[in-house]
Image (cartoon, helix red, strand yellow):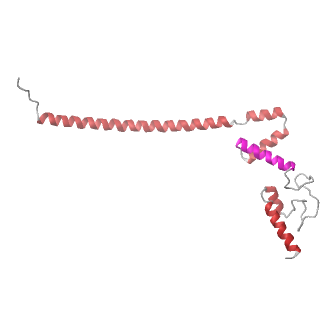
Amino acid sequence: MNDGQSSTSMTSSTNNYFKSSKSINELVLRNICPLCGVNHEGLCQGPEKCIHCTGPHSATSKICPRHIQEQKILEFKCRNHLTIGEARRIYAQSSKTNYSDAAKINTTAPNIEEILNQRVESIVQSITIKMEQQTTLLIEIFQKTIENLVQYLVTVFNQTDLKNPPTESAK
């Protein structure tokens, strides 16, 4: 193995490590070094420079303000059960506004508890309707069964009464 092959294989294995983020994946596709932010091949010789914030760290550093922001957005997304797009939009709005404006935004946003209560209420109503339908059906079946049973008993009683008239016992 010559030097060129080992540095290329090392670069591609290093790049595979950085494919976890969309922005890092774009770096890999464009063959940009995540350490110095420059398009080059082989081992990185330059000083670290972040392509996101131009700070003196690599693009994958956890101290990068962009990385910290993404972590906050993901945490906000998970805590509030939002999509990533909704979380980014709300986070961007809240970072541009002061506390009172953010409070207004939060009060106008739909309350998750209220939404869940509405959904549960809707489910309970549909279950109640189905149970009422089933109860009505069972009552009808029971009534028909009782009517048939009464008719059968009347028929049996009439047949028995005619064949064996009651006799009076001698006194």
Report the residue at 84% width, 66% height from top: 11
Range shown magenta: 63-81
Q: Position of residue 61 (x, y in %)?
A: 86, 53
Dominant secondary structure of the residues highlighted in magenta in the image: helix
Q: Nearer the viewer, residue 2 or 22?
A: 2
Q: Position of residue 114 (x, y in %)?
A: 65, 34
Report the residue at 81% width, 39% height from top: 94
Report the residue at 79% width, 63% height from top: 16
Q: Is 159 displayed left or right of 78 in the figure?
A: left
In which image quadrant can residue 60 be found?
bottom right
Q: Please, is residue 158 above or below residue 62 in the view? A: above
Assign the C terminus to one quadrant of the image.
top left
Q: Is 87 displayed left or right of 131 in the figure?
A: right
Q: What is the residue that sits farthest to the left in this orientation? A: 170
Q: What is the residue that sits farthest to the front in this orientation? A: 1
Q: Please, is residue 2 above or below residue 144 in the view? A: below
Q: Nearer the viewer, residue 28 or 6?
A: 6
Q: Position of residue 138 (x, y in %)?
A: 39, 38
Q: Is 103 displayed left or right of 44 in the figure?
A: left
Q: Is residue 115 magenta?
A: no
Q: Position of residue 170 (x, y in %)?
A: 5, 25
